[in-house]
Image (tube, rainbow, N blue to C red):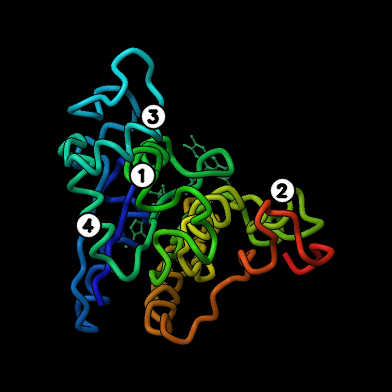
Amino acid sequence: MNVLIVHAHHEPQSFNAAMKDLALAELRAQGHAVELSDLYDMGWNPVASGADFGARANPDYLVYALEQRENYKRRTLAPDIQAELDKLLRADFIIFNFPVYWFSMPAIMKGWIDRVLISGVCYGGMRFYDQGGLAGKKAMLAITIGGRPHMLVDGGIHGDLNDMLRPILRGTLAYTGMAVLPPFVAHHVPYIGQDERVSILEQYRMHLRSIDTLKPMQFASMAQFDDKLYPLTDGSHI
Ligand SMILES: Cc1cc2nc3c(=O)[nH]c(=O)nc-3n(C[C@H](O)[C@H](O)[C@H](O)COP(=O)(O)OP(=O)(O)OC[C@H]3O[C@@H](n4cnc5c(N)ncnc54)[C@H](O)[C@@H]3O)c2cc1C
């Protein structure tokens, strides 16, 4: 399959970068075609603005999603967006590799999402969740995080990790139609011993060897809602 790794860490010697390097090597060894978007290395511009569009449908008032749709059709998206969109559309499996910043992703990666996951292609109209434009693709987060496992569960000080990551897991990946595999999480990596870190990298290798058997997380299906998006049942299934 075609794999895209979107990586956001400013330090090439970081543990997070070691996870990215391991995934590149392991997935290539498995016979997959792997592309990389190393956002800091590329000097990725994360700011969504009018400069993203070569030909404005409305030069007087910027409606970003509308211009995404129009400029995609006219092939006048900024070249950096078009290049990343082409990589995204080629990919069957996308890994987002990043350190957790403020319960979320680094701004540079958020800016990749904002600018590349364009309206009219990745979502739009009633095309979201299992009807999203990226249906058929798989996505997975590969993250490092300062906290320890017991801090990131229901009842723990920060609550459940998947609740923390909900804007990404649900609001971005599932929303655009991708099957979301459970995240791979490297906890507390700056504070543990070298042996433990080596062992986490080995666990990641095993995780990458089980991609085909990992069960995607469950999210809403459009069939559970009517044409005005009122739930057809009591909503307890979502
Ligand atoms: C702005 C900001 C916000 C943050 N918000 C949060 C938050 O909300 N919640 C939270 O829990 N944490 C948070 N953090 C902490 C952050 O998530 C962690 O510091 C980060 O994920 C650690 O990963 P790293 O790759 O940067 O570690 P690094 O410090 O780069 O690496 C850890 C250690 O691993 C070593 N290493 C590198 N490569 C290898 C290898 N191949 N094998 C073995 N060891 C290796 C390195 O030398 C280093 O000693 C935040 C940090 C910042 C800067």
Q: Is residue 72 left or right of residue 231?
A: left
Task: Write the residue at 59% across / 43% down.
Answer: 103
x and y percentages locating residue 238 in the rendered image: 72, 64
Q: Amino acid at mark 1?
A: Ile
The residue at label 2 has a CB less than 8 Å from ligand 1: yes
The residue at label 3 has a CB less than 8 Å from ligand 1: no
Give the labeled residue for mark 2. 158
Contact (Cβ within 8 Å) of mark 2 with mark 4: no
Give the labeled residue for mark 4. 87
Q: Separation of disc 2 and disc 1 at Cα? A: 32 Å
Q: Separation of disc 4 and disc 3 at Cα? A: 21 Å
* Marks 2 and 4, the one that precedes in the sequence: 4
* Marks 2 and 3, the one that precedes in the sequence: 3
Q: 10 Å neighbourhood of mark 2: few (<14), some, or many (≥20)?
A: some
Give the labeled residue for mark 1. 118
Q: Separation of disc 2 and disc 3 at Cα? A: 34 Å
Closer to us: mark 2 or mark 4? Answer: 4
x and y percentages locating residue 105 in the rendered image: 47, 44
Q: Separation of disc 1 and disc 4 at Cα? A: 13 Å
Give the labeled residue for mark 3. 64
